Image (tube, rainbow, N blue to C red):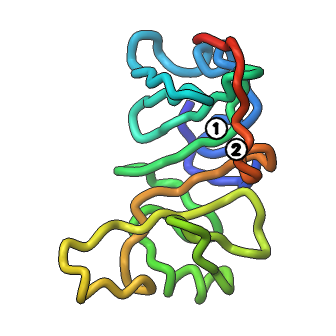
Amino acid sequence: MERDFIIPGQEIGGYRLNWSFRDLEKNIPQKTYKIEKHKHCWVIHYNNFSFWLNNKNGKITQIGVYGSYSGTFKGIGIGSTLEDVKLKIGAWKEDLDVYVIPKYKGISFELADNEEPEEWIEEKMPIEAIYIYTSENEKGRVGKGDFHP
């Protein structure tokens, strides 16, 4: 199923936001994923993907990729830098612990940590994770409920 493309706010690697857990299960081999239960959501980890499912409705509200995932958004992928983002896409801004592109809603980047804080220059640090998310997740409402995968 995994494909190498990223569409902010919609799809990453062939996996779509707003899918149900059952939709996701149809597209990944059974028993090859791990499930984490949190207060307001479930997180499914599979290969280089993580899927956040809303507890209230059981739908995927966020998908993250990391590690050896090779897909890109406009040439930006794992290992790219914020300098690359500025050159290929345009302005970026920090939003809590991630970086967003104001002209593209539904995508963010997490940078690798540097063990030498005095040498940490955000523009030069590699991107270690890319996330796409729904507008519901962007507002921080993952929901309480009785969904159980």
> Which residue is found at the position 59% from the left and 42% from the top?
63
> Which residue is found at the position 53% from the left and 46% from the top?
64
* Image position, residue 55 (x, y; %): 67, 23
State if disc 1 and disc 2 touch (CB < 8 Å).
yes
Q: Quadrant of the C terminus?
A: top right
Report the disc number at residue 73.
none
Residue 95: quadrant of the picture? bottom right
* Label 1 SS: loop
User: Considering depth in this image, is 105 or 55 the residue closer to the camera?
Assistant: 55
Residue 56: quadrant of the picture? top right
Q: Is residue 52 left or right of residue 102?
A: left
User: Considering depth in this image, is 99 or 143 the residue closer to the camera?
Assistant: 143
* Image position, residue 134 (x, y; %): 76, 46
Q: Is residue 71 above or below residue 36?
A: below
Q: Is residue 19 left or right of residue 66?
A: right
> Which residue is found at the position 43% from the left and 62% from the top?
78
Three-letter amino acid code at the position of disc 2: Glu
As measured in the structure, the alpha-carbon distance from the residue carrying label 2 to the one carrying label 1 is 6 Å
Q: Quadrant of the N terminus?
A: top right
Report the disc number at residue 11.
2
Three-letter amino acid code at the position of disc 1: Gly
Q: Is residue 9 left or right of residue 115?
A: right
Disc 1 crowd rating (10 Å Cα; few below 14, some 14-19, many 20+) is some
Q: Is residue 93 above or below residue 29?
A: below
The residue carrying mark 1 is 14
User: Considering depth in this image, is 84 or 44 the residue closer to the camera?
Assistant: 44
Residue mark closest to the camera, 2 vs 1: 2
Disc 2 crowd rating (10 Å Cα; few below 14, some 14-19, many 20+) is some
> Which residue is found at the position 35% from the left and 50% from the top?
67
